[in-house]
Image (spheres, helix red, strand yellow):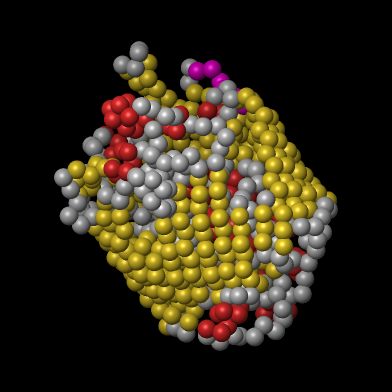
Amino acid sequence: MKKLFIILLINSYYTYCQNIMIVDNWIEYIEEQIAGSDDPSRFEEIYEELSYLKENPLDLNQVTHEELNRIPFLTDLQIRGLMDYREKHGYMVFIYELKGVDHMDYPTIQLLIPFVYIGEKNVENRPLDVNNMLKYGVNQFIINYNQTYQQKKGYKEYPDSILALYPNRKYVGEPFYHSLRYSYQYEQKIQLGMVGEKDAGEAFWNNYHKGYDYYSAHLFIKDINKLKSLAIGDYKISFGQGLIVSNDYSPGKSAMVIQGERRNNGFRRHYSTNENDFFRGIAGTLAIKNWEFSLFQSFRYMDGSVEDHTISSVKTDGLNRLVRDLEKRKTIPMQVYGGNINYSTPDVHVGVTLLTHSFGKYSYEPEEKPYNLFYFRGKTNINSSVDYVWKTKHTKLYGEMALSGNGAIAVLNGFNFIPASYFSFLVLHRYYDRRYQAWFGNAFSQSLSVQNEHGVYTGIQFTPIPYWKISAYRDFFRYPWLKYGIDTPSGGKEYMVQVDHTQNRFFSWYIRYRYKEKEKNILFNNHTSYDIIPYDQQRLRIQGLYMGYPFVLKTSLEGVLYEERSQKKRKGYAITQSIGWEAGTSPVRLDLFIAYFHTDDYTTRISSYEKNMPYVYHMNTLYGRGVRLSGLLRWNIWKNFLFP
């Protein structure tokens, strides 16, 4: 093979750029998204997707519009500007020609650099045959092993007599985490891979289980004549704005305030340790001129509680460490069929999606509570939708309207106005009926589901003078029915303002203020009564970044203030410093991180990221009082083999 990557614990960290110091600002982008989310685990997919793209960057002289759509922080105008620049000026020679691309600002270039490179001018269009696949294909092999020094209570030894009475006191498996990944890629046409994983505490080789707890495999073929894509095995789906189905990253509220649109990516492979958010079967798309025709089928088992063909709950954490977990493992069958037809030109897109899912002879009947009165119940559901995009030079309209089997609707519409390269405005309206049901829905929202939410989001981004950028958004939302933890219809609002300054190519800084207000239940009189109260959280973050070869220094200060009625204000802060060192052709890279934090409790927690192993998604949650230290050493032992 042309390249063989054998990676243990730490994967490669290389770039094809010309003598450019690479900074992982894209991780900061994900961290901003997490700061505005109630569920950080939703960002595991985009982290793994960008980690893979970083290890397999795109050639700016060959990249397509569709491939650039995979990069979530690029706007349509930036992608179109790059395509126009290449058409007008021909092949790019230096990476910083990106500065001449319309609508491409310096912060975006810094985000983009890890994922692109300048390839050779005249790359032959190689035919797809066995010889070329063997010669030019790229293999990647990753082994990850992790074990903590501190032993959890679940690994404690107990007498057999105690375990006979209380079998869930002890984990059934070994105290280490282990995963194995293999991937083969030939250009952008063929992707083949498999994943095996066991979590700490899950059985790997004993009487309970032998082998990995989770396996995944896929074959993905792209752009072979009229066959746009073919997925066999495990794959992901995204159509429209996600009101029916999307396994892709959902744009959230961050400093990139005009990124509210979900791009229509069709099918892509599932190459992740995420054990829930994927389909298993076959899917394909045929492209005929401006038309695309897609069909998909999936069947797999999920974890959950089942009794007498009645499903009372679905388990989504992917952990099978206890006897009771094993009793719920792969007990629920899920069959899915669907398709999409769409017509697209550079300025117009119209699509129709249909999806049905079934539990077969099983019926989903969660325990009835006031807040879940309108949740899906039964054996089968069907969803249909129409989505659209309409573009002009300075405006963009997009949206989707969806219908569930019970007749309820969900609607999302967005209007993006960009009169000049230095000014952008977005307004996004969403109406998700309390009765709307979409098992695989994943759209722009304040909560974690496409149901029981109305809201209006507006964002503005403005560059008043060179090297300064102001970003702001506000989101007003309303829940017309009860939600978990609040026993009345409720609502809230959220604001954010951020000022960025790029002083020169070595130093930049920003200051960000975020305010969020919601409502919740509060118990009193020894938990015999409750009331509904508003609560708010304010966050202020200041960060500076210095890039002076061979060092990268990042310093941040973040403060949190939490307040609810009739309660004492709670506060917290954290000071963090990260240092990265990489000298020229040195085979060694070193990253150090230190944080001091002091918060009153979990409500004033602060999320913090430090360098980790590729494909290993982990955000630290700092609360209480303490110091956190970490270090990461990358050593390129020899060509294409890296070790920590």
328 relative position to 223: left or right = left
Residue 486 shows in this picture: no
557 relative position to 136: left or right = right
The percent position of residue 73, horizontal first and vertical second, equals 60, 57
- Residue 574 lies, with reference to residue 334, above or below; the image says above
Quadrant (top left, top right, bottom left, bottom right) of the N terminus:
bottom right
The segment highlighted magenta reads 567-572
The percent position of residue 632, horizontal first and vertical second, equals 69, 46
Magenta span has 220?
no
For the residue pair 553 and 170, the one nearer the viewer reads as 170
The percent position of residue 434, horizontal first and vertical second, equals 31, 45
Residue at figure coordinates x 35%, y 13% from the top left: 526
Locate residue 628: give its quadrant.
top right
266 relative position to 592: left or right = left
For the residue pair 571 and 23, the one nearer the viewer reads as 23
Residue at figure coordinates x 53%, y 28% from the top left: 602
Magenta span has 571?
yes
Q: Residue furthest top?
A: 525
Residue at figure coordinates x 48%, y 28% from the top left: 535
Residue at figure coordinates x 51%, y 74% from the top left: 190
Residue 618 shows in this picture: yes
